[in-house]
Image (cartoon, grey):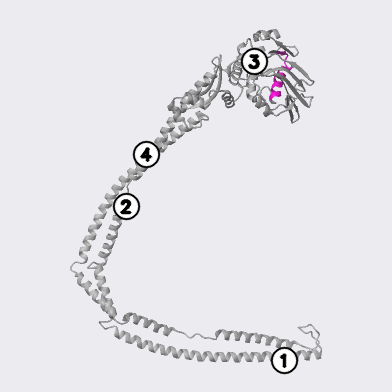
Amino acid sequence: MESITEINIKEISLSGFRNRKEPAAFSFGDITCVTGHNGAGKTTLAHAVAFAFYGVTYFGEQKTDRLINSESNTCTVTIKFTDQSGILHTLSRSRSGNRTELIFDSYTVRQEDINRFICDRDTFLCIFNPLYLLNMSADKGRDILMRCSKTVNADNVLKALSENFRSTLSGLEITEPYEMISSYRAGIRRCDEQLKIIEAQKQTLRETEQANNRECGRLAEQADAAAAAVNILSEKQFSGIDKEYFKARRSELVEKLKTASGSSCAAKIAACAERLKAAREREYVAKFTGEAAKLDSEINALREKYLALKEKLQSLTAGSRCPTCSVTLTDELLAKVKTEITAGLKEITGAAKGITETKNELNETDRKAKETFEQYKKEDIESLSAELDSLKKAETSEDSPDIMQKEIEEIDLLLARGLLSDEELSELETETKKLAALEAQIKKLREYSAAERIAELESQAEAFKNDRRSYAEIVSALCEYISKRTELVTAEFEMPNVSLTLFETVKTTGELKSVFRFAYKGTDVSSVSLSERTAAGLEISALVRRLTGLKFPVLIDNTESIAEFDSSQLDCQTVFLRMVKNTPLSVKHVSRAPAADALKRAS
């Protein structure tokens, strides 16, 4: 369907709506004056138009349950209107409980369809209700006006900028520039903070390098003192000692040791003595201890069983009860039981005798094994004692490996220690270790260089500086963008008596922030009278019509408080609502004469 850009209401029909329980119809002309006392139904017609087109009140409220007459379950509003081509259309909205039916030109439609081929609710109400935009929140009001604007989109603003600023903003998706400026200024602050941190790190590195140099000087003094002590002790250590002679003698002894047979006497003596000691300490371990213990356990068990049977036998008498089967014992049964128990006692005695004989055989075998062990132990001790005596005699020979080994050890001690005492040798070792540790520390400190790390930090700083320059250029370009957009918006939103402020500078930070503020003849609309506020609203309604190209009706309420109207702002169908005391509702068409005169005649 072709979009509807002009609406001229011809008739409104109501049923069950507000104070109209019964059906009622009202015709409208280009100029329509609606008069009557409070409660007569003037504002009902305003609500009816908003309800029919968008299911809301004249003020844009969604809760429309209050619009249904208190004595009705259903309300219906039907509007007949012509479009820009003079074609007559019929729009009807009915509400019953939570169910709504919307019919346009005999077809059931959805609200989305109305929004598509006419316009959205907010745009319609900004034209229809002159005070609608003035009562709207800042963010929503800005959004509506910016959507209506044809020239303030990002592409048009960029085209109006110089090539330098366009190039800076190239590739950026500009949404809300004042928020982007705040973000980029925060980026500049972050860069400044990082540059301060990097400068502090560089200063720390320089101070560390200077401290290292001072520490190197201090350690070098200690190293010189340690080196002097090492030199003095080293000179004394081998003074008057022919080290070459002792080295040659050591080599000679080593060669002799290589040709010497066998191991050293001392080692052989020690090994032999150890074997002799082990032989003397060797003890016999019985092999049948476990079996003997097991046999003793079996004998004890048989003994306990024998004693129990014997006690049982002695306790049996004629007429008593058998302790096993609880049967009363007659003389015959008593004799039989005693015979059985006696046989059991003999059997136990025989088994115990057999086990005892087996244990005696084990004991005899163990005794013979112990005698054999003791004989071998004695022979081993005698043999090892003779071998140890022989080794001790051979130990006194000069060419013995032990003598030569001992001389080598003495030569090694002399070559290592020299003429130094224990205290002096300990001091030499301490000073040598100290000198090595000091030289290692000095080397490590001298290897440390801050130059490479400082160069790396300077590279990082340069990157942050580049980012800062880039952010600053973008902020400058965005400020120019906002200035140019404000210029374009101001030109497009220019009205005779109403001015609109969309941006202002924050005094403390210099940043731009978004505002949405109307002034009528230089005074904020929140502080003007109702008539001045209505006059401002009429100019804003005319602005929205001009921006959108939509020619929709304008309904002006409370006109009894307005002395005159600017007829140049009323180039569309206009409905005046005026309170006249003690009169019924009246809807009259008047000619398109100056609005104030027409309204006076209608009243």
Q: Is residue 376 left or right of residue 547?
A: left
Dot 2 falls on a residue whose secondary structure is: helix
Q: Which residue is mark 3?
A: 572
In the picture of the structure, the residue carrying the numbered disc 2 is: 444
**Circle 4: is it few (<14), some (14-19), or many (20+) Cα within 10 Å?**
some
Residue 536 position within the rendered picture, expressed as x and y whole percent measured from the top left: 59, 16
Q: Is residue 220 left or right of residue 574?
A: left
**Other-residue count near label 3 (Cα within 10 Å), few / some / many at <14 / 14–19 / ≥20:** some
The percent coordinates of residue 365 (x first, y second) are 53, 91
In the rendered image, which quarter is residue 518 located in?
A: top right
Please name the residue that numbered disc 1 is placed on.
343
Please state which of residues 106 and 384 is positioned toward the viewer in this rendering: 106
Left or right side of 229 for 205: right
Q: Earlier in the sequence, mark 4 or mark 3?
A: 4
Q: Element type at marker 1?
A: helix
Residue 322 visible in the shown view: yes
Q: Are marks 2 and 4 in contact (CB under 8 Å)?
A: no
Whether the residues at callouts 1 and 3 have beta carbons within 8 Å, the answer is no
Can residue 562 be found in the magenta stretch? no
Sequence-wise first label, 2 or 1: 1
528 shown above or below 54: above
Q: Position of residue 2 (x, y in %)?
A: 66, 24
Counting residues from the start of the chain, the first of labels 3 and 2 encountered is: 2
